[in-house]
Amino acid sequence: MMRTLRSLVFVLAATLLGVATSGCASTVERWIVNTRNHQGDVALQHGNDADASVAYQLALRVDPANAHAKMGLVSVQRRLAFALFSTSRFDEAVAALQIAAKYAPGDDRITALQSEIEQAEIKRDIVVSNYPAYRETGSSIRRQVDALAQSSKQIATTLRRFDYTYDSNELTDALRQTYELADEVKRITARLVRYRTLVDSGVPDDAAAAAVEAPASLLPLP
């Protein structure tokens, strides 16, 4: 009888210990998940998508069904994917979307971005095949366009000087700068036309590649 009673007490104690331990573990897990979610939210507030992604993924390791972590991770992965896509890092962008798709299967925005990346990869391969030096030429044209913006600011500065000097020579300088700016716009436009032709149709010979080299420029204006 005493032996049976001791056995029952032992079983009851073990059961109670298990329940207590389980409850403690559950409390710790909730604390971890809440802490990771908070870290992710704070990272998002500071514009740190990479750290937010890590925090939400750590939360999901503990609780794969946590709605807050899933929603946060899917949102941040889409942003990371687009940022990578916009810098032509296609493989990394696709990998970022795959993480998002794991927690939001069938999401139209994820599918649409994946399709856009795939199309961009195809077009990039065609462009590279047609005109291998496209990147260098494109960068050169962008520098010319940036110079246009600086020249426009210089013209505005010249006009503002007239507002307090009332010297018509300022207007003469502004007029000269405007003519020079217009000439540069024409040169860039012609260069863009040749650039598009080479990107679309390919480079027939070295002379065609030389045709889109940067022409002599008067910009930036003095």
Image: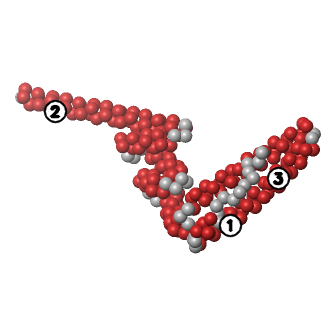
Between residue 29 and residue 157, name the one nearer to us.
Answer: 157
Q: Please indicate, yes or no, whether residue 83 appears anywhere in the rendered image.
A: yes
Q: CA distance from mark 3 to mark 1?
A: 23 Å
Q: Which residue is mark 3?
A: 178
Placement of 108 over or under 51, stated as above or below: below
> Which numbered circle lies on residue 168?
none
Q: Are marks 2 and 3 in contact (CB under 8 Å)?
A: no
- Name the amino acid type tagged 3: Thr
Quadrant of the image for the C terminus? top right
Placement of 48 over or under 126, stated as above or below: above
184 with respect to 202 (left or right): right
- Callout 2 crowding tier (Cα within 10 Å): few <14, some 14–19, many ≥20: few
Q: CA distance from mark 1 to mark 2?
A: 86 Å
Name the residue: 8% across, 31% down: 4
Q: Secondary structure at mark 2?
A: helix
- In the rendered structure, which disc, 1 or 2, sits on the residue that comes first in sequence? 2
Q: Please indicate, yes or no, whether residue 107 appears anywhere in the rendered image.
A: no
Placement of 12 over or under 175, stated as above or below: above
155 with respect to 169 (left or right): left
Q: Which residue is mark 1?
A: 193
- Callout 1 crowding tier (Cα within 10 Å): few <14, some 14–19, many ≥20: few
Q: Position of residue 13 (x, y in %)?
A: 19, 29
- Name the amino acid type tagged 2: Val
Asked which quadrant contains residue 35, the reply is top left
> Which numbered circle lies on residue 11?
2
Name the residue: 61% across, 58% down: 138
